[in-house]
Image (spheres, rainbow, N blue to C red):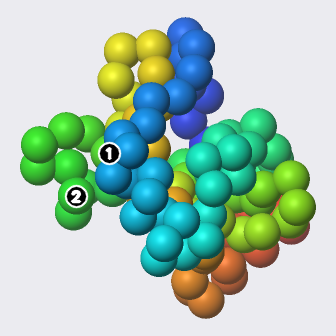
Amino acid sequence: MAQSPRLFAGITGFQWDEGNSDKNWRRHHVTQAEAEQVFFNRPLVVAPDPRHSSREVRHFALGRSNDGRHLTIVFARRGDLLRVISARPMSRRERKEYAQAEEA
């Protein structure tokens, strides 16, 4: 996994689907603000998500909210916006990968 600075070039904000936002809160207790914070905190680990990219190119990001929650964010770039598709706590495996990035 690696950071992808070019992926974020020209991004001006976020796009939210009300259904996804509600789902992220109901299932995982992750707010829109927390999900967005991940993209501004370091380290941020980003990788392609080919298994879920049949209709559009998707990526996932591993990072932390301002409160230190370790979150996984699945997103797609739509023009100059990032569309958050899913936001949830990191799995055990993802936390291990993120810890390795923190040490690097």
Indicate the quadrant where residue 12 lies.
top right
Residue visible at 78% across and 56% down in the picture = 65
Amino acid type indicated by mark 1: Arg
In the image, 21 versus 90, the foreground residue is 21
- The residue to which callout 2 is attached is 52
Query: Which secondary structure lies at badge 2?
Result: helix
Amino acid type indicated by mark 2: His
Left or right: where 27 falls relative to 3: left
Q: Give the answer, above or below, for where 68 lies relative to 78.
A: below
How crowded pointer 2 is (Cα within 10 Å; few <14, some 14-19, many 20+) is rated as few
Residue visible at 22% across and 58% down in the picture = 52
Residue visible at 38% across and 29% down in the picture = 77
Left or right: where 16 falls relative to 13: left
Q: In what quadrant of the picture does the C terminus appear?
A: bottom right
Q: Are marks 2 and 1 in contact (CB under 8 Å)?
A: yes
- The residue to which callout 1 is attached is 58
- Find residue 98 and report its horizontal and vertical position in percent: 70, 69
Query: Which secondary structure lies at badge 1?
Result: strand
How crowded pointer 1 is (Cα within 10 Å; few <14, some 14-19, many 20+) is rated as many
In the image, 86 versus 57, the foreground residue is 86
